[in-house]
Amino acid sequence: MTAQLAGRTVFITGSGGVLGSTYVRRMLAAGARVVATDLAGPRAEALVAAHGANPDFGFYELDVGNEEQVTRIFARVLADGWQPNVVLNNAAITGEMLMGAGKPFPDFADTSVADFERTLRTNLTGAFMVARQMDRDIVGKWPCTLVNVASMYALNGAHHPIYDGMPFKNFSAYGVTKAGIHGLTVWLAGYWAPRQATVNTIAPGAVFNGHSEEFQRRVGELIMAGRMAQPDEIADAMLFLCSPQAGYMTGQMVNVDGGFSAW
Ligand SMILES: NC(=O)c1ccc[n+]([C@@H]2O[C@H](COP(=O)([O-])OP(=O)(O)OC[C@H]3O[C@@H](n4cnc5c(N)ncnc54)[C@H](O)[C@@H]3O)[C@@H](O)[C@H]2O)c1
């Protein structure tokens, strides 16, 4: 049987995170070549340590909020012999990332414009710039697909009480950017269709990453499945969206949230 991602070269932003690193591992195992990108730092180093010896894996430093870097990235990748036909707009400023960086979570009334716009720059403008560069360098040259990563908090509001007393919170710019990214998906779907390019959104639910029992209990009560997702359960759907089996899908949002959005 042919491997699910045979013939796919997947370009991933923010690939050192909880989900990104899972996608990299699973995609390599499914026969893809993987061009991983992320900010420099321990997450990137861990990824290179895990996969650097695999000839089907390449790593490039990329800040998706840096226009000059994004403008040059596909030219560099193509010159090195990679020919991406799948692109994942996965990088984001997340609550977990802010917690890890020791950043405080101000109340809404105290949220600065600078903080709000920093999240927009990475999560939304960054995704736009990657898609725009894909349009310039890849779309129309060979069939390809883009997967934009939203969240269960894209089209549904955060349930604020579950964050009471927790070291992390959901913050307004996060939901705004995750709703916006699906706007990019539906706009591009029709624009790219004549050039054999598809684009979809995946909206993961709450992914377990060492959360406390109390948080798991609170969020579990909001989810039909009664529990958080394992990263591999999100990867199962992501691999499908990156595979030829998703070839007739475009402009869609796929919720992988244990039923959270369906109550
Ligand atoms: N984990 C969840 O519960 C969950 C749920 C819904 C959606 N998501 C989404 O899935 C995606 C991956 O989430 P995760 O849980 O792996 O998050 P994570 O915080 O573990 O990883 C995010 C990655 O993005 C990178 N990043 C941040 N700013 C960047 C920039 N300017 N340029 C390039 N890379 C940058 C970080 O270095 C990190 O490796 C995100 O888009 C997130 O919003 C996650």
Image (spheres, rainbow, N blue to C red):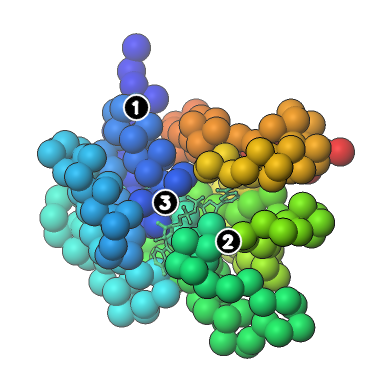
Residue on which disc 1 sits: 30
71 in relation to 54, above or below? below
210 in relation to 127, above or below? above
Q: Nearer the viewer, residue 113 or 208?
A: 208
- Residue 45 x, y percent position in the rendering: 24, 54
Proximity of marks 1 and 2: CB atoms separated by less than 8 Å: no
Asked if disc 3 is less than 8 Å from ligand 1, the answer is yes
Element class at badge 2: helix
Element class at badge 3: loop
Q: Can the viewer see residue 87 in this picture?
A: no
Residue on which disc 2 sits: 95
Amino acid type indicated by mark 1: Ala
Q: Is residue 238 left or right of residue 9?
A: right
Q: State which tag comes first along the sequence, 1 or 2.
A: 1
Residue on which disc 3 sits: 17
Cα distance between the residues tagged 2 and 3: 12 Å
Element class at badge 1: loop
| Rendered-image quadrant of the N terminus | top left
Q: State which tag comes first along the sequence, 2 or 3.
A: 3
- Residue 128 x, y percent position in the rendering: 49, 69
Q: State which tag comes first along the sequence, 3 or 1.
A: 3
Cα distance between the residues tagged 3 and 1: 19 Å
| Rendered-image quadrant of the C terminus | top right
- Residue 240 x, y percent position in the rendering: 50, 32
